Image (cartoon, grey):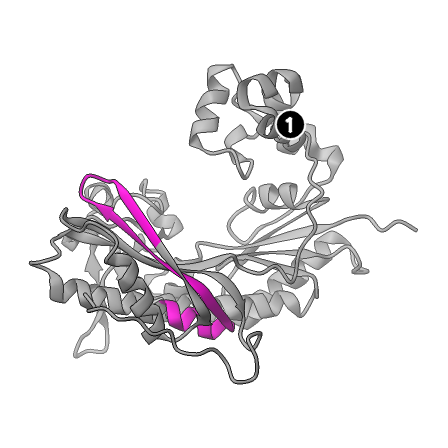
Amino acid sequence: MTVERRIAHIDMDAFFASCELSRYPELRGVPMVVAGHRQHEPRLLADGTREFSRLSQYTGRGVLTTATYEARALGLNSGMPTMKAAKLAPQAVLLPVNFELYRHHSRLFKSAVKSISEFVEDVGIDEVYADVSELDEGSRAIAERIKLAVREASGLTCSVGIAPNKLLAKLCSDLDKPDGITLVTMADLPTRIWPLPARRINGIGPKATEKLASIGITTIGELAARDKVELVEHFGRSTGLWMHEAAHGHDERPVQPNSEPVSMSRETTFDRDMNVERDRVELRRIFTALCEQLAEDLQRKGYLSRTIGIKVRFDDFKTATRDITLQTPVSDVGSIRKAAAVCLKRVDLSRRLRLLGVRASGLEREGATGPEGPEQAVFDFKPI
């Protein structure tokens, strides 16, 4: 007997903001954003209450990491420049980014999903796919069980979409947020999927959306109605055929529980343009911190990296990248920093810097190089 394919997409609700609300429950129902730095940590007052920073106090060029639903109602969204958000909602509460907290809750919710289905694909800190085809219950019962497990493990809510494939599951998990359940079958395409904007298809970005609009396509249904030949003419064979298939709800990609990351990276955008000579001490501190964070990511997830690289964005928005491949893979901060510094020496740093990042690629599981582990990478250079 053929088993009906059922794929669940589990998407945490306003994840970073929800993690913060688990620490500061008094902020529930209050417009709040995550974007600040350490100086924006709440202050504990003598009476036991907390004093929170406000968006009006922010200075710099960062962007919002996330916003509560109350903040979104005021026009604030993740990725928005923080100074712009401060003009829209100056009294919104401002909290600093706390990735350690977010990773903790991420591990909890993913473990909860894996307790229900062994076929789980990790696709981000706040979302996973799960193949639930073999489970005996109906789709709604499965979704409710996933949501309960996630809430009990993490204290947070999620939205679950279950559909015949990954593409539709991701689409429908967003339809009833927050804390929602959406079930879609192929028969539901005309009523549930085709009226949606074409940009809702994962993979259709702003440029493609603009180009589709120029030929009269704004909804998924309008995209589905176009001949594939026309789409190929406008977008090329690969993209045109994929758009046609996606609009008709076709997606054969399997859930891949053992998919391995291609790379890991850490980067930061400075609040002001940095001069290599004048800001050498601060840049050295930030550079070391990025390397430490990257080393922690590699070690926590059990990976070694054979290629270390850097990314630099200048004040004119031009970007330079450099990398170096090592004889033996590494995960310790000393080797990562040395390799990244070698890469930096290959970049003309005469212009002021806007962004700095460190990247590890060529990943392999720790222990793959033998029982004695990797040797330390050694370079002859003066660190920045």
Which corner quadrant holds the C terminus?
A: bottom left
Q: Residue 170 in the image: x percent, y percent?
A: 59, 45
Could you say where residue 247 lies in the image, as x and y percent from the top left? Answer: 64, 29
Number of dots carrying numbers: 1
**Residue 78 seen in the current view:** yes
* Residue that appears at 56% across and 45% down: 176
On the image, the x and y values in percent for residue 215 come to: 51, 14
Q: Residue at x 47, y 27 (%)?
A: 209
- The residue to which callout 1 is attached is 241
Q: Quadrant of residue 345?
A: bottom left
Q: Specify whether residue 16 is painted magenta.
A: no
Q: Secondary structure at mark 1?
A: helix
* Disc 1 crowd, CA 10 A, few/some/many (<14, 14-19, 20+): some
**Extreme residue in the left direction:** 278
25 vs 173, left or right, is left
In the image, 67 versus 233, the foreground residue is 233
Q: Nearer the viewer, residue 293 or 16?
A: 293
Q: Is residue 109 above or below residue 212?
A: below
Q: Does the rendering let one see residue 38?
A: no
- Give the magenta-colored segment's residue range: 294-322
Residue 126 pos. (x, y %): 49, 58
Determine the residue located farthest toward the bottom in the rendered image.
Answer: 372
Taking the image as shown, residue 249 lies to the left or right of residue 52, namely right
Which residue occupies the foreground of this view, 302 or 45? 302
Residue ID at (68%, 34%): 249
Quick check: 97 left or right of 352?
Answer: right
Looking at the rendered structure, the kind of residue marked 1 is Leu
Q: Residue at x 36, y 70 (%)?
A: 23
- Whether residue 299 is in magenta: the answer is yes
